C-alpha cells in the first residue's frame, strides 16, 4: 500500500487482513456446530453471565438490530440463549446464555483456543491490550465512558 513502513494505510490493511483471516479460521471451527462468527460474538458477550440489553449486544456484535434479532431468535430456538425483560427498565430486553448455552460456549471456547494455540499466537494476547487502547482512542462512546468513570476534573 505504501512505500513508507508503518504508514496509516498499512495499519488499516494489516488489521483488516488479520480480521478476515482469523474470522475464516474460527468460522471453520464453529461451522462444525452450525454457528457463525456473529453467533460466536453474541455467545462471547453473554458468557459473563450478566445479561445484556439487546442494543448493547447489537453494538458489540457489530450487527444491525434487525439482523441481531433474527440471530438471537435462532440461538433461542437452539436453547443457547434466552431473553427477559430488564428488571430495572421494563422497556428493555436483556439476553442471557441458557445453561445449555454456557456448556456449549465452554466447549467451543476450548476448540477456539486450541485452534489459536496451533498458530502459536501467544503474543496476540499482548496485542489485545494495545488494540483495546486504540479502540478507546477511536471510539467517542468509550472516551465518554472513561471520562465519566474518572469523575469530575479539577
Image (cartoon, rainbow, N blue to C red):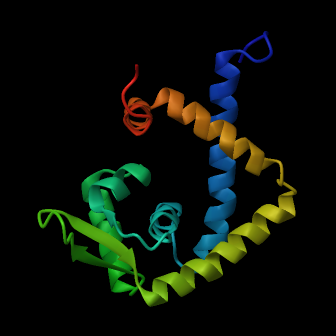
User: Is 131 drawn above or below residue 29 in the view shown?
Assistant: above
Q: Position of residue 151 (x, y in %)?
A: 39, 33
Residue sitting at the far front: 154
Residue 23 vs residue 57, the one in the foreground: 57
Residue 66 vs residue 1, the one in the foreground: 66
Q: Position of residue 103 (x, y in %)?
A: 55, 86
Q: Position of residue 8 (x, y in %)?
A: 65, 17
User: Is 130 drawn above or below residue 46 in the view shown?
Assistant: above
Quarter occupied by residue 4: top right
Quarter occupied by the N terminus: top right
Number of labels in the image equals 0
Residue 151 vs residue 107, the one in the foreground: 151
Residue sitting at the far top: 4
For the point 40% across and 19% down, the residue is 154
Q: Position of residue 101 (x, y in %)?
A: 47, 83
For the point 18% across and 63% down, the residue is 92
User: Is 128 drawn above or below residue 76 in the view shown?
Assistant: above
Quarter occupied by residue 149: top left
For the point 65% across and 19% down, the residue is 9
Residue sitting at the far left: 91
Residue 6 vs residue 32, the one in the foreground: 6
For the point 30% across and 75% down, the residue is 73
Relative placement, left or right, of 12 versus 144 is right
Amino acid at each position: 500500500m505504501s512505500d513508507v513502513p508503518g504508514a496509516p494505510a498499512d495499519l488499516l490493511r494489516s488489521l483488516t487482513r488479520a480480521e478476515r483471516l482469523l474470522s475464516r479460521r474460527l468460522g471453520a471451527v464453529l461451522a462444525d456446530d452450525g454457528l457463525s462468527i456473529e453467533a460466536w460474538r453474541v455467545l462471547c458477550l453473554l458468557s459473563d453471565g450478566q445479561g445484556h440489553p439487546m442494543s448493547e449486544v447489537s453494538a458489540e456484535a457489530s450487527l444491525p438490530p434487525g439482523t441481531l434479532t433474527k440471530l438471537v431468535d435462532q440461538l433461542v430456538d437452539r436453547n443457547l440463549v434466552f431473553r427477559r425483560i430488564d428488571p430495572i427498565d421494563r422497556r428493555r430486553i436483556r439476553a442471557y446464555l441458557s445453561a445449555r448455552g454456557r456448556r456449549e460456549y465452554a466447549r467451543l471456547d476450548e476448540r477456539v483456543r486450541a485452534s489459536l494455540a496451533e498458530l502459536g499466537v501467544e503474543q496476540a494476547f499482548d496485542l489485545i491490550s494495545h488494540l483495546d487502547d486504540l479502540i478507546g482512542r477511536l471510539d467517542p462512546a468509550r472516551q465518554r465512558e472513561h471520562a465519566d468513570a474518572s469523575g469530575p476534573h479539577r
